[in-house]
Image (tube, rainbow, N blue to C red):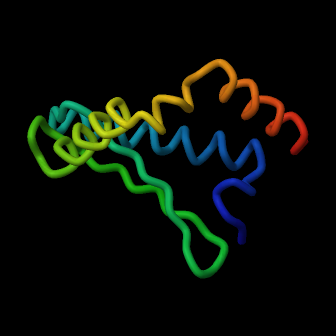
Amino acid sequence: MCWWYELTDEETHSLFNVARIVADKLKNTFNPDFICMYARGKRVPHVHIFLVPTFENDLLDRFFNTLEKFQESSPSLAELKSQKSLEKTFYALLKSE
């Protein structure tokens, strides 16, 4: 068993391929505006993929709209998009390899 970020390339490909197939079936059956995907594993190494059809103004749609507005309006989050911040993050990620 492992966490989602420890899956092999083959396991990741297989998992996301199945998620895409199921998402297509959900879209064809329920005609949602979007399929929200959520990966979770907690307490013990494992992963669940949740695929949730969402529609305009449902709970998830309102949640993500609110989150996007918060992210776009917060000066501290806006600063994260600056060239200096992006370069700092880029070099930090390079060091972690």
Q: Position of residue 5 (x, y in %)?
A: 69, 54
Q: Quadrant of the N terminus?
A: bottom right
Can you name the residue that lies furthest to the front here? 75
Q: Residue at x 31, y 40 (%)?
A: 70
69 sits left or right of 87 in the view: left
Whether 32 is drawn above or below 14: the answer is above
Q: Residue at x 11, y 35 (%)?
A: 56
Q: How many numbered marks have been drawn onto this rendered protein structure?
A: 0
Q: Toward which corner of the image does residue 17 lie, by quadrant? A: top right
Viewer-proximal residue among 67 and 48: 67
Q: Residue at x 29, y 49 (%)?
A: 52
70 sits left or right of 30 in the view: right
Q: Toward which corner of the image does residue 83 lie, by quadrant? A: top right
Can you name the residue that lies furthest to the bottom here? 43
Q: Position of residue 42 (x, y in %)?
A: 55, 74
Q: Residue at x 27, y 42 (%)?
A: 64
Viewer-proximal residue among 46 and 56: 56
Q: Position of residue 97 (x, y in %)?
A: 90, 41
Q: Toward which corner of the image does residue 75 lie, by quadrant? A: top left
Viewer-proximal residue among 25 and 6: 6
Viewer-proximal residue among 83 and 43: 83
89 sits left or right of 59 in the view: right
Q: Position of residue 80 (x, y in %)?
A: 56, 32
Can you name the residue that lies furthest to the top here? 83
45 sits left or right of 20 in the view: right
Whether 44 is drawn above or below 31: the answer is below
Whether 26 is drawn above or below 45: the answer is above
